[in-house]
Amino acid sequence: MSAASNSNESYCTFTLASDVTAGGLPSEEEIAKQLESNDPKTKRHALKAAIMAMLGGEAMPRILMQVIRFCINSDDKPLKKLCMLYWEVVPKYQEPTSDEVLRAASGGQPVQRKLLPEMILVCNALMNDLNHPNEYVRGSMLRFLCKVKDEEILGPLIPSIKACLQHRHQYVRKNAAMAVFHAHRLHGDTLIPDGPELMDAFISAETDIGARRNAFLMLFNESEELAIQFLAKNLDDVGKFGDGFALLVLDLTRKACRRDPNQKSRFVRVLFQMLSAESPAVSYEAAWTLISLSNSPTAIRAAAVTYTNLLNSQNDNNVKMIVLERLEKLKGKHSKILQELLPDIMRGLSSPNPDVCEKVLDVAMALVTHKNVADVVVTLKREVAKTTQESSDSSEEKGKVYRNMLIQAIHGCAVRFPDVAESVVHTLMDFLSSDGGMQVIIFVRAIVEKYPDLRPAILTKLINTVDEVTNTNVMCICLWILGEYCETSETVKDAYDTISAQLGEAPFIVQPKDKKAREDAAAAAAKGPQLVTKNVVLADGTY
């Protein structure tokens, strides 16, 4: 990569909200005048405007001296932070002359970057902040220096950065470690050639978790052998060094073992320790690292146990799905080991999320064998029974989808293992009237077709429960099964009587009582109207 040019983008690692200078940007003269104000708020507004203008391509050369004169020594912390952002975006080198550019273009001496004279004052101000009595100011400046790439600016500050490694406050020390790492990574041979040795001595005496982690990060990237030596000396204390340190150790393990597989024995002990870490991130990464480095049954079993513990202890559905995906990949080569842990995997069905339950069933069904199918079916039957109990509660989210998944899983077990078919089919037939009745009757139809020995018991159960079916499609399949597989006279008669009782009286058959009543009515209508006479006594007594 070529050296940084004078373009503004080369120094920018941040963005500012567009409403910082609502109403339009002030001119360079207005910004310079506002920076002379004694009000820190006015200075902050002006400095924000200058940064926005420079990000937009404005040069604003006058502002640099104004910032150095009126802002650089301010005690206002927000203003100091804005100054750091300003140092990122401001051009730090002189523009090359036209003669130098032409000479370099014609194959002559390349253009030499020359630091602006004003940057000497800036470096002095940065050094003052590195030696500031306030630990916040020191730490903020050290964090800012991690973004500076210019060797001419970092060079004079190296002694102050090293001195910050011995500061009493951990905030300063951990940022000083990162600043040393940054300087050594960019200009290690010229600025700080003794960086790894310095950091090795620092980490040996450090007690803060964050500072130790940053120091180990530098050793991990800049001097791997020193990092391995430190790890070997402190194997028993890795669990006390924090999650960030543990994750770095895992990164170091993977990097070292990929480069040299003979190094695996040096890290096995620490990997097994991290499997039982309190942090789920550390235990997950340790299990994954152990699987990627070793195929021994002991290592695979320990990693699988860690995965199942994470599956049953974490509430985040995303974590559960990630762990299940790892288990699914693991079962391809180590299915026998996962079969031992199948009961623990099935405990994942307690999740209220149907997607997690579906993934658990997918993994579990691939691990079912003759040895564990009975336990799996018992668990599935218990879960099906729970769905009927939960239907009246507020946990209806699983509801139909979950019940159908369970029925399909039981169906798969019964088809693959005939020994359990009889024990599950009678249980599932109790759900013919539920919303999963279609899945149940399809399952019953498959069992009746595949296992003739079970037909009498299943047909008897179906005849006794057909009156509970409310879904027309389910009823159609029930009638088809009875018509297709009722072969003995007894079952035919029972099925016919049950179906007839459900149908009731046929509307197209005239009953005897109704026939007599209709005949009487027809005869009366055929006679027509009749004349009826009777005697009437008049008023005078005559008839």
Image (spheres, rainbow, N blue to C red):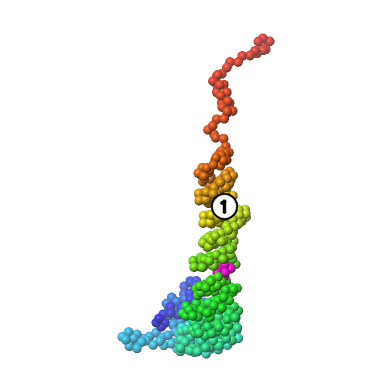
Please tell me whether residue 236 is drawn above or below residue 418 in the rendered image.
below
Q: Amino acid at mark 1?
A: Glu
Residue sitting nearer the eye, 283 or 488:
488
Q: Residue at x 60, y 79 (%)?
A: 240
Q: Residue at x 56, y 21 (%)?
A: 523
Q: Residue at x 56, y 59 (%)?
A: 373
Quarter of the picture holding the C terminus: top right
Residue topped by disc 1: 422
Q: Which residues are drawn in magenta?
A: 303-309
* Mark 1 neighbour density, 10 Å: few (under 14) some (14–19) many (20 or more): some
Residue sitting nearer the eye, 113 or 379:
379
Residue 128 appears anywhere in the view: no
Residue sitting nearer the eye, 290 or 369:
369
Q: Position of residue 395 (x, y in %)?
A: 60, 57
Q: Residue at x 50, y 44 (%)?
A: 484
Q: Is residue 314 left or right of residue 105?
A: right
Q: Position of residue 169 (x, y in %)?
A: 60, 84
Quarter of the picture holding the N terminus: bottom left
Q: Position of residue 245 (x, y in %)?
A: 56, 79
